[in-house]
Image (tube, grey):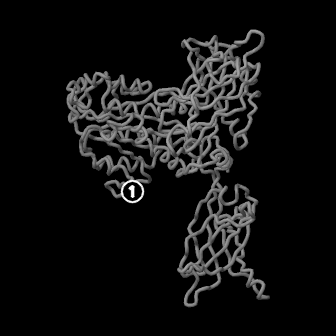
Amino acid sequence: MAYTMTPTPAGPVGSQYCVCKVELSVCGQNLLDRDVTSKSDPFCVLFMEVNGKWVELDRTETAVNNLNPAFAKKFIVDYHFEEVQKLKFALFDQDKSSMQLYEHDFLGEFSCTLGTIVSSKKITRTLLLGNGKPAGKGMITDIWCRDHLAECLPGPQHVNLQPLLQSLKSEKPQSGEVQDKSTLLLFVVCYHMPAQPSLEPTEIAAQELSDNRVITLSMAGRKLDKKDLFGKSDPFLEFYKPGDDGKWMLVHRTEVIKYTLDPVWKPFTVPLVSLCDGDVEKQIKVMCYDYDSDGGHDFIGEFQTSVARMCEAQDASPLELECINPKKQKKKKNYKNSGIIIVKYCKITRDFSFLDYILGGCQLMFTVGIDFTASNGNPRDPTSLHYINPMGTNEYLSAIWAVGQIIQDYDSDKMFPALGFGAQLPPDWKVSHEFAINFNPTNPFCSGVEGIVQAYSACLPHIRFYGPTNFSPIVNHVARFAAQATQQEAASQYFILLIITDGVISDMDETRHAVVQASKLPMSIIIVGVGNADFAAMEFLDGDSRVLRSYTGEEAVRDIVQFVPFRDFRNAPKETLAKAVLAELPQQVVQYFKHQNLPPINSEPA
């Protein structure tokens, strides 16, 4: 195997703005022994596929004379849901001080996607040598263990994996499993990154990882001092925390409430780490001002408290704090206060990310809906949108591959329903707008994206393209399964429907109604328009610029439709289409589960 060292890239591989980072902790068990007089001295190298080539990202330290290493060095990788991120873990026995990998004995490797790692609790793979044959009797096991992650302290650190290794040794192998197995363990830790790139990503990531809590406050005032000569005050609040230099730092400012001494401010939410550095006992200062348009706001009063104290507030028994003006307090002997600030409600929750839900075990349930209406043309005609060219593809297949190869990493059984609409089916040649393209209505599932492609190709000669173009039956089909998933009252499943179509929707009113109802469910719809038709109706369903309404006037609870015309990506790299159609999906998943107050499965309480 010809391995050469690749210079470390100047920046992270991937797009400029990474939503989060994933930390992989690696340890091995029963590795091959390549040394004659002692045991191997293994180290692990991580590669990522970039433009068809394996690029070295990082390598661990060397574990001297050890076939069961627990590497202290962590791999930190930028995680992008909308990309297929292929990784390769290669192990070597260090023989020299050279950085060139061909100078060292090769112990084995395995490849997978980052999506597979973060979405799996445990997967087992054969450890392969350079010729593709198994490395002895070795197996590779990727493990992500939720319980161990919950116990980890914030930030990069050494994790003692020996107890887990011992427990793994004591496990009884399943039928057909090799007992002397060479094992690689990967532990996944999520780093939530800020929206803008940072010069100190590791330090900021550690803080973000240690505390994803947010605090929601509902504040009011009573009998505040009157500051305006011809009217009442226009009060607002400012929240401060102590900085490292001892000065107070502004954290949050409420809106201004006009012409009142008894204001009620809108509830607001801020990260707990922003308000008090995550320390609920730390003192914070709240200052009350009367707004003036010239910027010379009049000071009403202030007080100091802590998050722990404010959390004593309940709906039935709010917390009242005196607003004090120190100057007035010194001047007036009978001064009591400048009003009362009321904490009506205070609650700390966790601001979970998309990756939190995936790591928690949420499965993405993928369904494909394919347009077989006559406007597509005869599939045997090269001008048809369903014509499979000599390269074995067309725009329908390109869309299926682009979305499916991403989503399939997040579904454990990788069995996907594939449905068609707008065709006449044998033997009676009745039109159907909801049929299994494998012609098995009781089991419309296909094995992986390859299974969808095979079923699609096989069904083309056996159906007659017809019409009209009705979306609502397939939308309602997936919605029924999404509705059943809500009965679990857990963030365990989220449904994704990919519709690929060439034309204008015939049942727009019914489709609008179906989408509005589906917006209440754990479900998103991706529409890819193929060909050169007018797709204005699709843009209408995609509620980026306006709220979608049903024909009854009911508004969609949230935007769940993402539409892209394939023609915009014909000459672009194949990865570009996937990024475009999946760009909004992570946000839609998080938005739904947050709206339902569903945390990731087995997540820690705030």
Q: Amino acid at mark 1?
A: Glu
Could you tell me residue 238's position as x and y percent? 63, 70
Rendered view: 266 above or below 11: below
Which residue is more in the foreground, 171 or 61? 61
- Asked if residue 479 shows in the view, the reply is no
**Mark 1: secondary structure:** loop
Residue at the front extreme of this rendering:
98
**Residue at x 65%, y 62% (from the top left corner):** 346
**Residue occupied by mark 1:** 555
Location of residue 325 (image quadrant) = bottom right
Could you tell me residue 103's position as x and y percent? 64, 17
Left or right, 113 with respect to 441, comes to right
Left or right, 66 with respect to 4, comes to right
Location of residue 442 (image quadrant) = top left
Left or right, 414 with respect to 424, comes to right
For label 1, the crowd category at 10 Å Cα-Cα, with few meaning under 14, some 14 to 19 and many 20 or more, is some
**Residue at x 49%, y 42% (from the top left corner):** 15
Residue at the top extreme of this rendering:
36
Which residue is more in the foreground, 246 or 546? 246
Rendered view: 126 above or below 193: above
Location of residue 36 (image quadrant) = top right
Could you tell me residue 207's position as x and y percent? 67, 49
Could you tell me residue 170's position as x and y percent? 74, 20
Rendered view: 347 above or below 588: below
- Asked if residue 499 shows in the view, the reply is yes
**Residue at x 52%, y 26% (from the top left corner):** 54
